[in-house]
Image (cartoon, grey):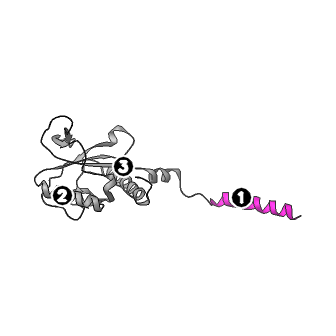
Amino acid sequence: MNFYALRFNIYLALIMSLLLGVGCKSTPKDDKKDKEVSAIRVHMESVAGPGTMTQTVSVIRSDPVSVTILSGPVLTESDVVLARVLETSAGFAVELHFSTTGTLLLEQYTAANPGKHFVIFGQWGEKDDDGRWLAAPLITHRISDGVLSFTPDMSRDDALRLVKGLNNVAQKIAKGALK
């Protein structure tokens, strides 16, 4: 008799968990957002050089400006610990907070290169047009606090996706999931 009562209780528990949604953490759409990643590459403006050390890129889609940069980035998404979208009087800006190593690199490059530009590339989606050169902020002073803000050439929705993906990458790095 106990055998049937046990089976009944298991079936009842299974039906109740299905009805109440127990064990369902999030919707598939939320899972995709949590897994979304973005990339950011901050390059330094340079004079044209031989070989593959430099390249010329076009920044700002509405009024393109050509800038010659060092091919290798000086900062990447692996240096970002926090990203966010800020409201400004002209619209919005993206603010990047860098790790200790990123902060030191940012300080060195800004101290050594006043009057030059950082040129920033972002990738935030799976489509080809979800990645492009976003901004070329002028270096006016040494940045020692590890925070770089810029007004990107992108929609607010794309900026929010970029920031969400960068924060996801930062969390994975902090947990040791990415190396």
Q: Main secondary structure of the magenta part?
A: helix
Q: Indicate the quadrant where residue 79 lies.
A: bottom left
Which residue lies under the disc numbered 2? 108
Please report the residue visible at 19 percent of the width from the left and 60 percent of the height from the top: 107
**Which region shows up in magenta?**
1-23
Residue 123 in the image: state x and y as whole percent. 33, 45
Crowding at dot 2, Cα within 10 Å, few <14 / some 14-19 / many 20+, comes out as some
**Residue 154 position (above or below residue 84):** above
- Compare marks 3 and 1 and give the one earlier in the sequence: 1
Q: Is there any visible trace of residue 96 in the rendered image?
A: no
- Quadrant location of the N terminus? bottom right
Q: Which circle marks residue 38 in the picture?
A: 3
Please report the residue visible at 41 percent of the width from the left and 59 percent of the height from the top: 171
Q: Are marks 2 and 1 in contact (CB under 8 Å)?
A: no
- Compare marks 2 and 1 and give the one earlier in the sequence: 1
* Residue 179 in the figure: left or right of residue 12: left
Which sits in the foreground, 116 or 155?
A: 116
Q: Is there any visible trace of residue 121 in the rendered image?
A: yes
Crowding at dot 3, Cα within 10 Å, few <14 / some 14-19 / many 20+, comes out as many
Which residue lies under the disc numbered 1? 14
Please identify, in this view, whether the residue under mark 3 or under mark 1 is nearer the observer: 3
Give, as a three-letter code, the residue at label 3: Ser
Give, as a three-letter code, the residue at label 2: Gln
* Residue 6 in the figure: left or right of residue 97: right
Please identify, in this view, whether the residue under mark 2 or under mark 1 is nearer the observer: 2
Give, as a three-letter code, the residue at label 1: Leu
Circle 3 sits in a helix, a strand or a loop, which is it?
loop
Quote the CA–CA distance across marks 3 and 1.
39 Å
- Compare marks 2 and 3 and give the one earlier in the sequence: 3
